[in-house]
Amino acid sequence: MALYKYYSFHNLKRALEGKVRFSQPGAFNDPFELLPVINMEGIADKQGNTQLQLSFDIKGKRRPVDPVEFKEEKSNYEHDLISRQIVDSLNHQIGIFCLSKNRESLLMWAHYADNYAGGIIEFDEEHSFFDGRIDVDYRKYRPSRSIEFYIKSKEPIPISELSVKSLEWKYEEESRVVKILSECDIKKGKTDSLGYPIYTSDIPFEAIKKIIVGERMPKEYQKRLFKMIKKTPVNFEIAVLDMAEYKMAVDPVKLDYPLHQIFSPRSAHLHFDS
């Protein structure tokens, strides 16, 4: 199963230049991110003064018996105030690089690839850069944990156990790489729309297998990207409207061998004017 990232043109170009963003959990567009509900039942101090000393494992897999419940019933002892405190702490500690296993999502083309004016990078999932990646779990109900689990926990909590999202997001088929922010580079003076500092990490060029440029990407932008990979093993394709279904087909331009290029009316501008 390959890994894909939907990009605007400018972010796709930055990735080809070797930089990808690792975003803090609070910078995501899902407000439920990493927020399980906490059941406080059985704890004498219910005034929010419980002090937790927690550590996290950024690459640990979900444990065979995951101490998380998924249930429809609600309890008067449940809230997510402590979870929010945990996420606030994680915002200063970790960054997440989000990918997808789905290269055919019209919604992601629209939302993340600049309304089809951006593109997709296909990554080599076997490259060491993706070691320890986490597949997101999709559920109807929010995960619920007992506060006693956090208090008594003697081992780091895997971030994978917190990576649970609503079924509404299942089409994304998300997979994640998590890094410690101190291992990333900060863009001084730069923040995103929510005010979070922007952290980036180097990604090896050999981790990139293919570029698929969007139906609406300007030809000048296509030329710039094609020039960057023309003499490399990276494949290049142009997304086109399928003639039968509501989906994107592709028009191949270049295969992995640098000199193996495919000529068509749609890609002629790349071969003869680049």
Image: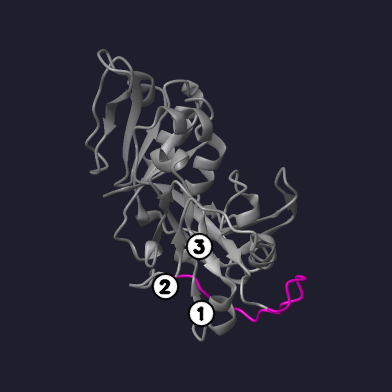
Q: Position of residue 104 (x, y in %)?
A: 34, 32
Q: From the viewer's perspective, is 196 left or right of 261?
A: right
The magenta-colored residue range is 44-59
Q: CA distance from mark 3 to mark 1?
A: 12 Å
Quarter of the picture holding the C terminus = top left
Q: Earlier in the sequence, mark 3 or mark 1?
A: 1
Instruction: Identify residue for label 2.
Output: 60
Mark 2–mark 1 CB contact (< 8 Å): yes
Answer with mark 2 or mark 1, whichever residue precedes in sequence: 2
SS assignment at label 2: loop
For the residues labelled 2 and 1, the Cα–Cα distance comes to 9 Å
Mark 3 lies on residue: 162
Q: Residues within 10 Å of mark 1 (few under 14, many from 20)?
A: few
Residue 260's mark? none
- Residue drawn at point x = 36 percent, y = 72 percent: 65
Which residue is at a point 24% across and 38% down the rendered structure image? 255
Q: Is residue 139 magenta?
A: no
Q: Earlier in the sequence, mark 3 or mark 2?
A: 2
Q: Specify the quadrant of the image occupied by residue 273.
A: top left
Give the amino acid at mark 3.
Leu
Q: Is residue 38 above or below residue 240?
A: below
Quarter assignment of residue 234: top left
Count neighbours of disc 3 (C-alpha within 10 A) and say few if under 14, some if 14 to 19, many if 20 or more: some
User: Which residue is farthest bottom?
Assistant: 154
Task: Measuring from the top left, give residue 22's x and y in whole percent.
Answer: 56, 57
Q: Between label 3 and label 2, give the one nearer the viewer.
A: 3
Q: Image check: 188 left or right of 154?
A: right
Taking the image as shown, residue 177 lies to the left or right of residue 42, namely left
Residues 145 and 89: in front is 145
* Colour scheme of the picture: one colour
Residue bearing mark 1: 156
- State the SS at label 3: helix
